[in-house]
Image (tube, rainbow, N blue to C red):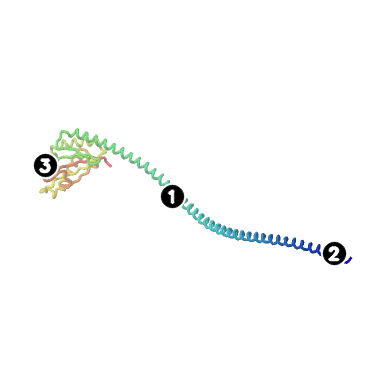
Amino acid sequence: MVIKDFINSVSLCLILLLSGCAAISEFTTEAERERQERQRLEETVQGLELKEAQLQTEIQNLRLEVARLKGDESVLHLEIQRLKDENAELEAKLISCRKHQKKLEAELVEADKRLAGMIGERKERFVELDKIKRELSSGLKEYSGVSFGERGDAIAIILENALTLKSGKAGIRKSAFPLLKEFAEILKKFPAHELEIAGHTDDVPIKVSYPDNWELSAARALAILHYLEEQGIEPARMSAAGHGEYMPRATNTTPEGRARNRRVEILILKRK
């Protein structure tokens, strides 16, 4: 009986021992799993913390970029305002230029009109002067010592001294009266033209009557003027001047040249 009880006790102890070993083994496995899970969680936390740090860095970088962009935006706003101001100034200048252009165009139109008028007037004046020249050439062709020329917009009638005037004096030769009468009759047909009568001499000093050649040339021009006035030419159409020896048309070193320089020139031009 005692042996049986002992055996039963031993058996019970073995059963309890085996049960405890199994429990210990199970506990050890569970602890390992807990440790591994803890390690995984810690690694996960570390990864998240690292990610958080990276995100914080990115956020900081983004904030810096936003600040830079805001600064750029301010600069752009200033540049935009500057460009707007410059554009407004350019538009104002453009408006001013257009006004000036219109003014110049109007002035150009007026200038064209004036030019056309001047061309027409010049053409008319040329036609009239050409008609006068043709009539004078025809009416005075029988007289020697008369020549024609042009002085800008004027006709020049050149009367040699030997033909019209006495040597060393201002008196008109009687032989020149028919010439001057014919000249006056032709000029009466053209009352819109005036006469500028100019006396010229050679450079030989005058010895009697006049202090110098200048006064002699002026006296000769006046003698022609007064004779034309007697023939009916209005005094208001005429003027006289003396140039002495200072406007020669040939050399004064030869008799021929001095003879050409002794002359009276009558310029015929449109009255202003």
The image quadrant that residue 256 belongs to is top left
In the displayed image of the protein, which residue is found farthest to the bottom? 2
Separation of residues labelled 2 and 1 (CA atoms): 125 Å
User: Residue 241's spot in the image, x, y percent?
Assistant: 20, 46
Give residue 30's position: percent from left, percent from top: 73, 60
Mark 2 or mark 3, which has the lower sequence index? 2
Disc 1: CA contacts within 10 A as few (<14), some (14-19) or many (>=20):
few
Task: Report the side of 88 relative to 261 (left or right).
Answer: right
Of residues 74 and 232, the one nearer the viewer is 74
| Residue linked to disc 1 | 93
Front of the two marks 2 and 3:
2
Label whose residue precedes the other's in the sequence (3 or 1): 1
Q: Which image quadrant: the N terminus? A: bottom right
Q: Secondary structure at mark 3?
A: helix
- Of the two numbered discs 2 and 1 on the same chain, state the one appearing first in sequence: 2
- Discs 3/1, front: 1
Q: Residue at x 23, y 40 (%)?
A: 154
Residue 95 rendering spot, x and y as whole percentages:
44, 47
Location of residue 9 with respect to 141 vertically, above or below: below
Q: In the depicted view, which residue is nearer to us: 151 or 50?
A: 50
The residue tagged 2 is 7
Q: Nearer the viewer, residue 232 or 53?
A: 53
* Badge 3 vs badge 1, beta-carbon distance below 8 Å: no
The disc label shown at residue 256, or none: 3
Q: Residue 27: where, in percent of width, then height?
A: 74, 62
- Left or right of 35, for residue 160: left
Cα separation between marks 3 and 1: 70 Å
Compared with 39, 245 (above or below) is: above
- Identity, as a three-letter code, of the amino acid under mark 1: Lys
Residue 241 in the figure: left or right of residue 38: left
